[in-house]
Image (cartoon, rainbow, N blue to C red):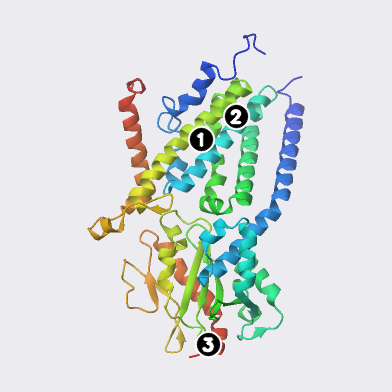
Amino acid sequence: MSNKEKEPIFSAKNMKLLTGPLGSSNPITVQILGICSALAVTAKLQPAFVMALSVTVVTAFSNLILSMLRKTIPSRIRIIVQLVVVAALVILVDQILKAFVYDVSKQLSVFVGLIITNCIVMGRIEAFALGNKPWPSFLDGIGNGLGYGMILVILGFFRELLGAGTVWGYRVIPESFYAHGYANNSLMLLPPMALICVGIIIWIHRSRNRSLCE
Amino acid sequence: MNRQSNTYIIGYSIVLVVVVAVVLSLVTLSLSSRQQSNVEVEKMSDILGSVGLYNAEEAAKAPNKNDYVKSEYAKYIVESFLVDSEGNKIPNSEKEAFATLNNLKAEFAKDASERKLPVFVSKNDEGRINYILPVYGAGLWGPIWGYISLEQNLDTINGSVFGHKGETPGLGAEIATPAFQKQFVGKTLFSNGAFVGISVTKGVGSSAGNSHAVDAISGGTITSRAVESMIKTCVGDYEPFLAKYGVK
């Protein structure tokens, strides 16, 4: 174990692990991880939100568990061990969603299972959890899950609003707009437009945070 | 201890896999009855929904949604039975009719002579009788299914509900929305005594005036076509029953 003095649970360094991924080290807009699912589940806000929550749970606990195991894992089967732990957590999340929020789990369908393939999960385990203590790893997992989730929710909000005229399934664009020739942009519901939206978010993010540009 | 030795690696993987397997099976076992009941309740609410007897808001308000749906189902579904390939009701098949919903795919795939298909009969507060038929097919990414409720003449559609496993959200998945489903109301399955089913036509409003067609979902053409063929084959399998009991 390290010989550092005991630091408080929410020290400045730990808080940075939690808040960093929301801004300057956001997994989607800065590290460009997890783009695939960000495109797939954000056509509507509600699935995007539940997906964000599920990914946060998985990144947090996979980081925590693997950080606790990190001294025992044989390096030659390191990736397999990570996969087993992540897969088990994803199945747990899926089972729990099916038992307690059945309707939402139906909407998310295959995408919950696909959390396993989300680059953020494995990326954070490799990059952080295997070299850090459990508590900071746990915070790092939560932070990255939230950073990912934040982008998902933003994307889900705009795609649902502009593509279907609804937010969280409730109609927000009044019928009278349609009567005057307003039309939903169905391109917003297709994955390519999601990619363009991610691009716009990255653009806004970088224009406000110059240090991210080379 | 040498963490790079083969013995350690093999031992480590065995322990890890066993632990994970035990945890997962415990969780699955403890949650499966709840999941089973969710699935059952979903079927019941879909059956009721196809006749317009399911009120999702009421169900959400009920203290226990599952109990609420079960009691509504018991109240409105007055009869359920299986029909054989010649369209005869099989007596005392009430329990089997609901159980068949769990393996509809296999049932529809059977040879026509062995097929036993479930029919549900509902009676609403005003005493109106409707017949509900389950349908099942393949969508773009996975299975799609639904329930079609028919008027007493077994020709006119009274309502429909569709579900899917993993159609594209916002596109094919729109078959599960009321906007798509309510198009089926009032359409007819038979044309001059011959079964034609319901077709999907491209473009909003393109099916206006056609009593055997509905508008496809733009961007969801493959799923829309899958609905069309699902209705043609599955409801088509009921044709002997519809022809026998329908009032033409």
Expressed as whole percent of the image width and height from the top left, the position of residue A109 reads 54, 52
Expressed as whole percent of the image width and height from the top left, the position of residue B106 reads 63, 69
Tell me the CA gap for discs 1 and 3.
57 Å
Tell me the CA gap for discs 2 and 1.
13 Å
| B98 up-or-down from B193: above or below | above
Q: Nearer the viewer, residue A124 or B74?
A: B74
Numbered disc 3: secondary structure: loop
Residue shown at 56% from the left, 60% from the top? B59
Residue B183 visible, this angle:
yes
Specify the quadrant that holds the N terminus of chain A.
top right
Residue B118 visible, this angle:
no
**What label sits on residue A63 in the rendered view?**
2
Expressed as whole percent of the image width and height from the top left, the position of residue B189 reads 45, 81
Numbered disc 1: secondary structure: helix
User: As drawn, which residue projects farthest toward the bottom?
Assistant: B248
Around disc 2, counting alpha carbons within 10 Å, would you say few (fewer than 14), some (14 to 19), or many (20 or more)? many
Report the chain holding disc 2.
A
Numbered disc 2: secondary structure: helix
Q: Which residue is mark 3?
A: B246
Closer to the camera: disc 1 or disc 3? Answer: 3
What's under tag 1, amino acid-wise?
Cys
Closer to the camera: disc 2 or disc 1? Answer: 2
What's under tag 2, amino acid-wise?
Asn
All told, the count of numbered labels is 3
Q: Which residue is mark 1?
A: A119
What's under tag 3, amino acid-wise?
Gly
Tell me the CA gap for discs 3 and 2.
62 Å
Residue shown at 65% from the left, 37% from the top? A84
Q: Quadrant of residue A158?
A: top left
Q: Earlier in the sequence, mark 2 or mark 1?
A: 2
